[in-house]
Every structure is written in C-alpha cells, then in structure tokens.
C-alpha cells in the first residue's frame, strides 16, 4: 500500500499477516485485537493517533494512543 488512507478504519480482530502498510496513514484507526506478525510491513506509516478499542456511547475515545487529545 503506498499513500493509502486507512483513517478511522476498524481493524478489529483483523489478521494482517504479510499485509503491506508501507506509507499508509492509520490516523484514527481502531486496532482492537488486530493480528500483526513480523511479516506485516509498517514502514513509513503515518499516524497521529489510534484507538485500542471500539467506541461506545459512554466512551467515544476508548484507549486513545497517545492519550493527549490535543493532537
């Protein structure tokens, strides 16, 4: 993947063995229980923040990383 926007993608329980994210933008992606391996290519990924869990009504920003919401 070159210059691919994966913004706000729901990668929940997604198996990404050998997926090539080179140069992708993952800002705002939900990566709960995603499966990556040493063969998953993450070179040059751009990402301001991700969420470790899916949002709920009570928590619209679940486990945001980094925790600083000013970005």
Image (cartoon, rainbow, N blue to C red):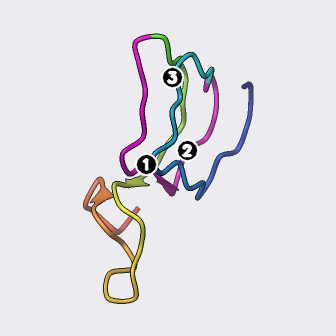
> Crowding at label 2, few (<14), some or many (≥20) Cα neighbours within 10 Å?
many
- Secondary structure under the numbered disc 1 in the rendered image: loop
Give whichever of discs 2 and 1 has the lower sequence position: 2
Task: Name the residue that disc number 3 marks.
Answer: 42
> Crowding at label 1, few (<14), some or many (≥20) Cα neighbours within 10 Å?
many
Which is in the foreground here, disc 3 or disc 1? Answer: 1
> Could you say where residue 41 lies in the image, as x and y percent from the top left?
53, 17
Task: Name the residue that disc number 2 marks.
Answer: 26
Residue that appears at 35% across and 61% down = 53
Point out the stretch of residues depicted in magenta. 21-38
Label the magenta part by its dominant secondary structure: loop
> Crowding at label 3, few (<14), some or many (≥20) Cα neighbours within 10 Å?
some
Image height check: is 70 above or below 57?
A: above
Give the label on residue 31, or none.
1
> Could you say where residue 29 lies in the image, as x and y percent from the top left?
51, 53
Question: Is residue 3 toward the left or the right of residue 68 in the image?
Answer: right
Residue that appears at 40% across and 12% down = 38
């Amino acid at each position: 993947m070159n210059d691919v926007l994966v913004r706000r993608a729901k990668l929940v329980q997604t198996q990404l063995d050998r997926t090539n994210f080179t140069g992708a933008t993952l800002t705002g992606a939900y990566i709960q229980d995603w499966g990556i391996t040493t063969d998953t290519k993450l070179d040059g990924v751009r990402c301001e923040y991700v969420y470790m869990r899916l949002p709920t009504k009570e928590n619209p920003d679940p486990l945001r990383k980094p925790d600083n919401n000013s970005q």
